[in-house]
Image: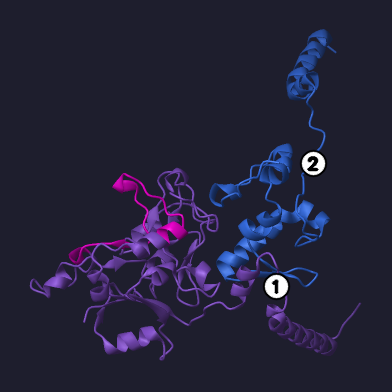
Chain colours: A blue, B purple
Amino acid sequence: MYDAGKIIIGLVVFIALVSYPIWYDAARGDIPTSADPKIVTSEKECVAPTEYMKANHMDLLNQWRDDVVRKGVRVYTAESGRKFEMSLTHTCMDCHSNKSEFCDECHNYAGVDPYCWDCHIEPEEVQR
Amino acid sequence: MTIDKRKFIKTAGLASLAGLAGKNILGQDVSEVIEPGSFDRLSGLQSPLKAERWAMAVDIKKCQKQHDCTKCIDACHHLHNVPEFDNPKDEIKWIWKEPFEHAFHEQENKFQKTDLIHSTPLLFCNHCDNPPCVSVCPTRATWKREDGIVMMDWHRCIGCRYCMAGCPYGSRSFNWRDPRPFIKDQQQDFPTRMRGVVEKCTFCDERLAMGLLPACVEACDVGALVFGDLEDAESDIRKLLNDNFSIRRKPGLGTQPEVYYIIS
């Protein structure tokens, strides 16, 4: 290999620069390990099983949005047969009124920025 | 697995029968289960107001007797988080008042009943039968529902303002600025809009779904606003239109506006 020394030094510098965010955080000691959303409701069941909601709540919300706004269907029947109003502000946030500990916890970790709250008004959070 | 035509048609027929039966059962038990926490809302949703053709009638005389009354406008704008800007260029309006000659400039008679000429009729979205705003919307963010309401999906509006150019009544407003800081007394139940989105009156579709009349109709103490089903011969609005002379805004354009103004 010609110029092996220069190439290897170049590679090391390149990798160091690219991985800068990782080791910078590691050095500061705040690597986010996992998100831990808090559920504070006394309600026993959600509109769908927890595993499904964890992975697919955004699809469900999109479905609800289209059903309510475009089709005028506003009542959702869960698998258990229970009826819910299809409403982010009422149904979802009635239980998950702690937006910062519930929604934001994962969204910040995953680096996503959903635009729900550009228009929908978030519930006022009670300081615990 | 192979399947012949005969077998396929049989299975398909049975499946669709089962589907129909299932749908009927579902349709019947809607009112059974009601959540304790959201009792009112869910039970309201079980008895929505429905019509074949929603329409509004405004009794100009009754309305104008209440000189500077703005109860309907206040109720509407409060419930729907309509912002109030100081600069008239930023104005957002769902219901508003306009001098008679602006609202009805096709009424050309120089001499007319003076109280009519000097009136300031209430204006709304006309929820046209042939809405130009719907034809021009490139994203179908606005469309006509089966009950005649010209609806909006703010999620889908890209703010191109074609609808505003298309609407001959000025019923649509554009959010040039973030409306949030300009909403007095935010209403939790209803979303706000964001910058770059068009908005207008929706005949309170969210209230009709709960079995409630539009907020403006409810707020009017003197019964100057009558809301109902035009296709129902027994409805109040039909009786009112049968018994009185009424006009509509710019009928010559062929948009078939569905807000009627009683002037007799």
Q: Is residue B168 left or right of residue A36?
A: left
The residue segment tinted magenta is: B76-102
Q: Is B85 above or below relative to B111?
A: above
Relative image position of residue B250 (x, y in whole percent): 26, 71
Q: Secondary structure at mark 2?
A: loop
Subunit ID for the residue under disc 1: B
Q: Mark 2 — residue?
A: A36
Mark 1, Cα crowd under 10 Å, few <14 / some 14-19 / many 20+, is: some
The image shows residue B49, relative to residue B207, as above or below, that is: below
Tell whether A105 sits left or right of B152: right
Indicate yes or no whether the magenta region holds residue A42: no
User: Which amino acid type corresponds to the residue marked 2 in the rendered image?
Assistant: Asp
Please provide percent x and percent y for residue B253: 28, 72
- Residue at x 41% of width, y 62% of height: B75
* Mark identifier at residue B222: none
Q: Amino acid type of disc 1?
A: Ile
Label 1 sits on a secondary structure element that is: loop
Q: Which residue is mark 1?
A: B34
The answer to whether residue B97 is magenta is yes
Q: Depth check: B69 or B107 in front?
A: B69
- Foreground pick, B231 / B63: B63
- Can residue B95 be seen here? The reply is no
